[in-house]
Image: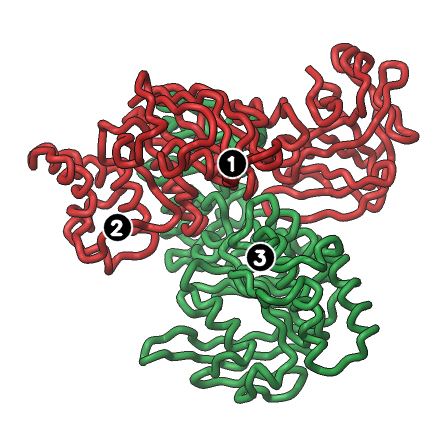
Chain colours: A green, B red
Amino acid sequence: MGLILDQVNKYVEGEMHLADISLDLASGSRNVILGRTLAGKTSLLRIMAGLDRPSTGKIVMDGKDVTGISVRKRQVAMVYQQFINYPSFSVFQNIASPLQISGVPKATITEKVMETANLLHLEEMLDRMPAELSGGQQQRVAIARALMKDSQLLLLDEPLVNLDYKLREELLEELTAIFKKRDCVVVYTTTEPSEALKLGGNIVVMDQGRVRQTGPTAQVYRNPATVETAQLLSDPPINLFAARLKDGHLTLGDDLAIAVTGSIAALSSGRYHIGIRPNHLYLHQQESGDIKIHATVEISEINGSETFIHFQYSGYKTVLHEVGIDARKIGSDITVYMNPANFFVFAENGELLISPGAADTAENQTA
Amino acid sequence: MAQISLDEIAHSYLPYPKNDADYALKRIHNIWNDGGAYALLGPSGCGKTTLLNIISGLLKPSKGRVRFGETDVTDLPPEKRNIAQVFQFPVLYDTMTVFNNLAFPLKNRGFDNAYIKTRVKEIARILELETVLHKKAEGLGADAKQKISLGRGLVREDVAAILFDEPLTVIDPQLKWQLRCKLKEIHEQLKLTLIYVTHDQVEALTFADQIIVMYEGKIVQIGTPQELFEYPNHKFVGYFIGSPGMNFLPCTMENGRARVGKFHIPLDDRTAALGNRATGSLEMGIRPLYLKIHGQETAGSFQVPVQSVEDQGSYRVVALSFNDQTIRARIAENEPVPGSMAWVSFPEKWIRLFENDQLLK
């Protein structure tokens, strides 16, 4: 059971908005659609909801073709970026509204509202009007309303984007726990890799109206199929360098020669892209096999618990992310350590060839 | 550029405020240095935007005076205060070229063309807008437009301060890094006084030299990112800064140790002395980053159940049940993950004690 999208395309006035989208989302699964602004996330969500019809392709919900069926006749709940509530209804009435339409006994409604309000910490505010609530509280009401119906499909379109950072962190944790208990298909869109990783479950990476990769989120993070996916899933951005391989010797950037072994050495000679995540660049040597490079600090940022150092290497913008505080002055010389074991190797066309610790990931899966 | 003094500022949106609760800003008394990069950080409703509007002149405070250098500007409207502002959404002229948009604030003030040309080019170079200088703004993407907005704020050298109100909220994460770095570079090069309002701790901490943390109309702490992280003055700062926030455990003092239920946690001499002197309600705080998790028993560790382990890419968050309360530890991507039970220890160096929500020091 679940939601199936079969070769969905969407054109608006001749312009492609979604291209060739096929997805199979199981009931009880959490699915995060990650992509930049205008990647097609909202268009896709609207088609899933039945708010828009696809130009071509099929949508199947729990085994039934629902392609042409409007949102009203589907069991769908949706939460939007903007906080949408009935302004003249109290919080209680807002949360109760989806059940009042379908003629459910009053006692059942009250019980269900209390249960849902508890889940979202709204029990103290049931008598208030939406305008008397903070943004975070208003969005909680909208989410509570979406949870009231036993819908087959729960869609959330960047629901936390207009909320404060700290509130977002808390609500995200609560939502993750709530989603885990639901039997429906949950689909959640975001532009932030950290949000996707916190929610866990499965990820659908979108770019320019197309699905680039799907899979369990942590697995996709460690095995991005292309350079683009790696970039979309890295915050701070993944560092990328052009490289040449010849007779087991890798040359990174202009002139950094690295003797490589194992799977990298086994690749045929030619040009590659090397990706290395900022948290795999270090200011101190970690292992004997580490390679060092020298660089000049352009910017150094401290966010309290972490240090980010920006520098250029062979003309590439590079960022190092270290846990703890290690302030370096702008313009000072630093030595940066890295290890080929942490390299992502991409082909010239951007396809992933080797990911670091691929063996570990396989172990995790079976565990 | 000038030093900004906030002299006994308080503000209420009500005509006749009666008590403390009627004030959106309770008491602000501070001096901000010329050429500093400041961030006003706090949740919505903490008063940060009210304070920014008082500095810009959009609001006149109910009490107190605002001075830029020696000049009292309390009664001056924004246009007479010599400040530049950048807002959450791009403010520019769509039909004008990027060049003219950037030149506008200078033309308005009658600078000569040669100067305008040099200055606009310099700002365009810093913001990497050179290639689009002669394009119209309307055809450009949201990020380019916000860069133009930033440029319009930065173009005048003669301003007392530049105020930013959540300028990167609408920007995608990857680009945020670039723009934030740009702002930092600009501050290094031009040494302008920058005041940046945000609810995002990462933006505030990475941008500013000094962060002003606000909570319920008050400044609860002013400090460098490191100070706020290592010595939060107030429980709110401990919670608000850092992700996840600081762990807090109610405790009592017993034989120089912090007692949490059946657990007796060792403290260093200084912290123990502070705790022994305290008379109010006591809590122990420690950052998730500093909690140590072990796979087997080690000296000074306590065995507790593991509630969950979340993989967040470059790190993991382990939730533990400690005396029936959840505490969180942040561990590196490559550190081993414990099973259903783990041993946790509290490095003495990183334990802080709070009495009635205030840091003991």
Residue B326, given in percent of the width and then of the height, sits at 79, 41
Residue B128 at x, y = what percent?
Answer: 26, 43
Location of residue A307 with respect to A274 vertically, above or below: above
Check disc 1 and give the amino acid type: Ser
Nearer to me, B360 or B85:
B85
**Pointer 1 residue:** B12
Image check: B233 left or right of B210? right
Left-right relation of B227 to A365: left
Residue, disc 2? B92
Location of residue B319 in the rendering, given as x and y in whole percent from the top left corner: 75, 43
Q: How many residues crowd mark 2 within 10 Å: few (<14), some (14–19), many (20+)?
A: some
Where B137 sits versus B27, above or below?
Answer: below
- Please identify, in this view, whether the residue under mark 3 or under mark 1 is nearer the observer: 1
The residue at the far right in this view is B262
Q: Earlier in the sequence, mark 2 or mark 1?
A: 1
Most foreground residue, A78 or B8: B8
Q: Residue at x 49, y 81 (%)?
A: A7
Q: Who is closer to the viewer here, B82 or A250?
A: B82
Query: What chain letter is assigned to the residue under label 1?
Result: B
- Residue A357 in sight in this render: yes
Residue at (43% x, 54% y) in the render: A268
Task: Report the disc number at residue A131.
Answer: 3
